[in-house]
Amino acid sequence: MQPLNFAIEDCKIRTIQNPRMIKLSKTLPPDEKPKYVDLFKEFQDVFAWSYEDLKSYDTSVIQHTRPLKPNQNPFK
């Protein structure tokens, strides 16, 4: 088993005035890279690109919770 190569490259998916950068692995096959870039371009309105983007969402939707049984202490 070979170790993973963590070499990444930055790819722009917007214009210079409104840049959006994504990071793709350099080990990605050449025919796969355009597919990922197109996917991010198509769904760029879904991703939060900055912390300001997150402030508009309801925290009850994105807040992490752990359900606990009544009268039980959490354990590790």
Image (spheres, rainbow, N blue to C red):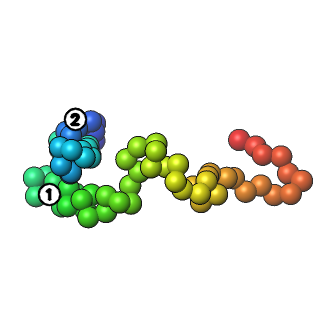
| Mark 1 crowdedness (10 Å alpha carbons): few <14, some 14-19, many ≥20 | few
Res. 34 mark: 1
Q: Amino acid at mark 2?
A: Ala
Residue 11 shows in this picture: no
State left or right for residue 46 relative to residue 41: right
What amino acid is labelled 1 in the image? Answer: Pro
> In what quadrant of the picture does the N terminus appear?
top left
Provide residue 15's location: percent of width, then percent of height. 18, 49
Q: Residue at x 27, y 36 (%)?
A: 6
Residue at image location 17% in from the left, 43% down from the top: 16
Q: State the separation of the CA atoms marked 1 and 2.
A: 18 Å
SS state under label 1 = helix
Instruction: Please tell me which residue is depicted at 89% across the width and 53% down the height of the picture.
Output: 71
Residue 73 point in image, percent of width and height = 83, 46
The answer to which quarter of the image holds residue 69 is bottom right
Give the residue at the far bottom of this rendering.
42
Q: Nearer the viewer, mark 1 or mark 2?
A: 1
Near mark 2 (Cα within 10 A), the count class, few <14, some 14-19 or many ≥20, is few
> Most extreme residue toward the front, as rendered?
17
Residue beneath disc 2: 7
Q: Is residue 20 visible?
A: yes
